[in-house]
Image (cartoon, rainbow, N blue to C red):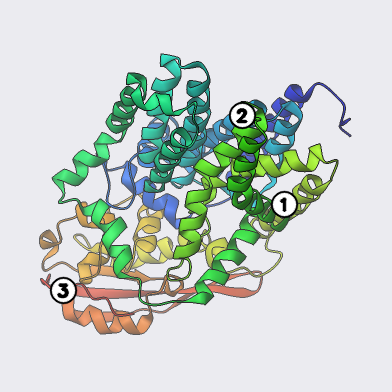
Amino acid sequence: MINQNDKNWERYTLWAIIGAAIFRLVIFLRFGLTPQESYYWNFARHPSLGYFDHPSVTPWTIWLTTKIFGTNIFGIRLGAWLYGIGALIFLWLIAKKLWDEKIAFWTVVSAICIPLFDVAGMFFTPDPPLVFFWLGATFFIIRATENDLWKDWILTGLFAGLAMLSKYTAAFWFLGAFIFLLINEKHRKYFLSQKLYIAAVISLAAFSPEIIWNAQHRWASFLYQSTRRANEIRHLRFGYFFGYIGAQLFAVSPILYIGAVIKILRSPFDYIKSIGQKIEGTKNYLAELVILSFSLPMLLFFSAVAIIYWVKLNWLIPIYFVPMAGIVGWSIEHNKKWHFYGIILAALTTLIIIAVMVFPLAPITGELASTFGWKKLANRVENELSQLGDGTFIFGAEYKVPAELSYHLPNHPQVCGPNVIGLRGMQFTYWVNIDTLTGKNAIFAIDPRWGFSLERAKKLLPKYFAKIEETEPLPIYRAGAKVTTYYIFRCYGYEPRTLVLDKSK
C-alpha cells in the first residue's frame, strides 16, 4: 500500500506507466483488428499526403511500423501503444506542473484505469495520436508562456499542427490556445511576439499535407467533415443527448466523469474567483485557466450538438485529462477519497470489459463484438472466389466489411467499396476506378450490424449486375449467442452506372 505521505511519487508514477505499458501490450495482442483499424491499415498501404475520412498521422504511423514489424497485429497497433504511453507522460508533466507529484501520480493511475483512455492506448484510431499531440501542445504552451523560450514555442506549434494532422477536432485546441492567451493579462503580450506567429506558421506547415491533398481533390475531406455532417441534422432529438451522457458516463466511468465535468463547468467561476482574490501566478490559478481554455469550449459545443446529432463517445476524449487531474487534486487537498473510489470503479469496469472480450463469458454486441467473425467471412469469400475464377473482384456495402476482408484474405487483395453500387465510397473511391471493373464478376458481402440490410442488397445489386445469386448465410456465434449473420452474393457481369448516391436506409 502506498503511504500518502511518501515523497517518492515520481518513482511510483514511473512504475505505474511501465505497468500500464506491459498490460496494454499483452492485452492488445489478444484481439483481432477492429474494422476501423483495418480501414486505417488500408490507408497505410496507399501512402498519400492526405485522406478522405481523417488526416494522415494514423496511416503514416501504421505504414512505418508495418514496414519495420510486418503486417500483423503488433505492427499495426504498435503506434497506438507508443502514443498512449507518451500521452501518460505528458499528462504526468502537466499535472506535476499545475499541482504536484502526488496528484500527478494519482492522475496517471486514473487515466490508466479509465476504459476510454485505456482503449485509446491499445486500439489504433486517430484518437491515440490526437491525445498525445494535444497534451504535448498544452504542456509546451504552458512552458512557453512561463519562460518565453524559442524551443517551447516551436514545440508548441509542431505538436499543435500534428494534433490537427491527427484529427480535425484538434481545431478546438487552437481555440483554446487563443482563449488561454487572450483572457490572461500576462499572456496577452504574446500576441505582439514573433515567437507566437512563428509557432503558428510551424503548426500550419505540419498540417499542410492535408491542405495540399484537399486542394488537389476539390476539398473533399473538409467538405465531408463540415457540410455533410451539417446536412444530416434534421430536428431536436433529446434521446441523442441522453445517449451521449450515458456513453460518456460508461466510457470515462461515473465518478471521474462527473467530477471532471463539474470541474470544467466551474472553471470560469473559479478563474474569476482567483483573480478577485489576487492569486494570479499560483498553480491553482493556472490550472483553472488551462481547464477553462482547453476543455470548456469543446464540452459546451458537443453537449449542444448532442441534442440534434449523435455525438460519439470518443469525440471529447482529449478534454477530460486535465480536469480529471483537477478533481483528483481537489479530492486529495480536501482529504477526500473520491479519486480513489473513482479509480476502483473505473478499473473494475475496464477489467470486466476486457475479460468479456477476451473470454466467451457472456454475449456481447455492437462495437465490443466488432473484432469477431471476420476470419470466417474471409474463408467463405475465399472459397466463393475460387469458384468464380480469375478477374473476380470483391466488394462490401460500407467501409468495415471491405476493410476487414482486405486484411484477412490471403495476399491482402484490394477489396472495393460501396461506390461499386452507387453508394458513398469513402476512401475506397480513391483506390479503384470502377470503370476498370466493367463486365467482371464479383463477390459481395454484407454485415447487417452496420446498417446495410439484406433487403437493400437485393434491391441495389440487380441495378449493377446482369445476374446475382445469394449464397448460404454465415451466422457468427459467441458465448452461445448470435453476434451477426454475414450475407454473401455471387454477382455476374458488372455494369457501372452514373447515378446519384443512394441515400436510402
On screen, residue 16 versus residue 312, left or right, reads right
* Residue at the spot of label 2: 280
Identify the amino acid type marked 1: Ala
Spot occupied by residue 174 in the image (x, y as percentages of width and height): 40, 39
Residue 417 is left or right of residue 477, and the answer is left
Q: Is residue 409 left or right of residue 12?
A: left
Q: Residue 145 placed where, x, y %? A: 49, 23
Q: Badge 3: few (under 14), some or many (20 or more) residues near its Cα, within 10 Å?
A: few
Say which amino acid is labelled 3: Val
The tag on residue 500 is 3
CB atoms of marks 2 and 1 within 8 Å: no
Residue displayed at 11% across by 69% down: 439
Task: Examine the rendered structure and indicate whether residue 380 appears above or below residue 403.
Answer: below
Please identify the quarter of the rendering in which residue 450 is found.
bottom left
What amino acid is at disc 2? Glu
Name the one closer to the observer, 467 or 197: 197
